Image (cartoon, rainbow, N blue to C red):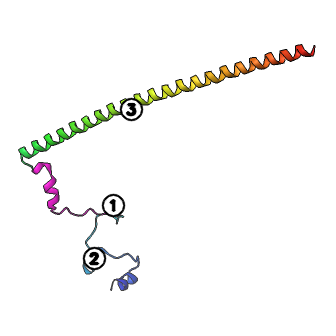
Amino acid sequence: MFLQRAAQDATGVPSDQEVSALLEFFKVPPREGPLQLQLHRPIPLRQYDPRLTARNPMNELPSEHNMRKQRNKSTKKRQQGVRVTANVVREAQDEREERAAARREKKHNEIISELQQQQHLMKTVDNFKAAAKKKKKR
């Protein structure tokens, strides 16, 4: 029906009545503006979830709220105490390691010193022997 009228019309443009008749026929609601691409995924409607309401702090009684705050505060204090204890233990361990490293270094230095003295003594003896040999040759 529409194609026949469009073919008979000189301009080829359908009239407003024809467009509205087509829209009504196809049951397409009229739009204000051009079609647009949907830019985001549709967000589903929120439904009742009893787990969310159970954990919502706004649904708690004031006494429950105070108890929860007190529990959180005591938990933080315990965690701080554990951290302080861990720091003290770590510092003591670092101090012990430093003392052990100092003892090892002192022992190492003593051994090196003793070896250097022996080496000096051996060189001195060798020099005396070489000097004695030279005197014998003359």
Residue in front for this viewpoint, 10 or 23: 23
In the picture of the structure, the residue carrying the numbered disc 3 is: 93
Instruction: Give x and y (percent) for residue 118.
Output: 67, 22
Inspect the image, locate mark 1, and give the three-letter code of the amino acid beneath it: His
Q: Give the mark nearest the N terminus, 3 or 2.
A: 2
Magenta region includes residue 45 = yes
Taking 122 as reference, is 55 left or right? left
Mark 2 lies on a secondary structure that is helix
Range of residues picked out in magenta: 38-59
Mark 1 lies on a secondary structure that is loop
In the picture of the structure, the residue carrying the numbered disc 2 is: 23
Instruction: Select label 1 or label 3 by which is in front.
Output: 3
Q: Is residue 65 above or below residue 107?
A: below
Magenta region includes residue 84 = no
* Mark 2 crowdedness (10 Å alpha carbons): few <14, some 14-19, many ≥20: few
Residue that appears at 56% across and 27% down: 108
Q: CA distance from mark 2 to mark 1?
A: 28 Å
Inspect the image, locate mark 3, and give the three-letter code of the amino acid beneath it: Gln
Instruction: Give x and y (percent) for residue 91.
Output: 37, 30
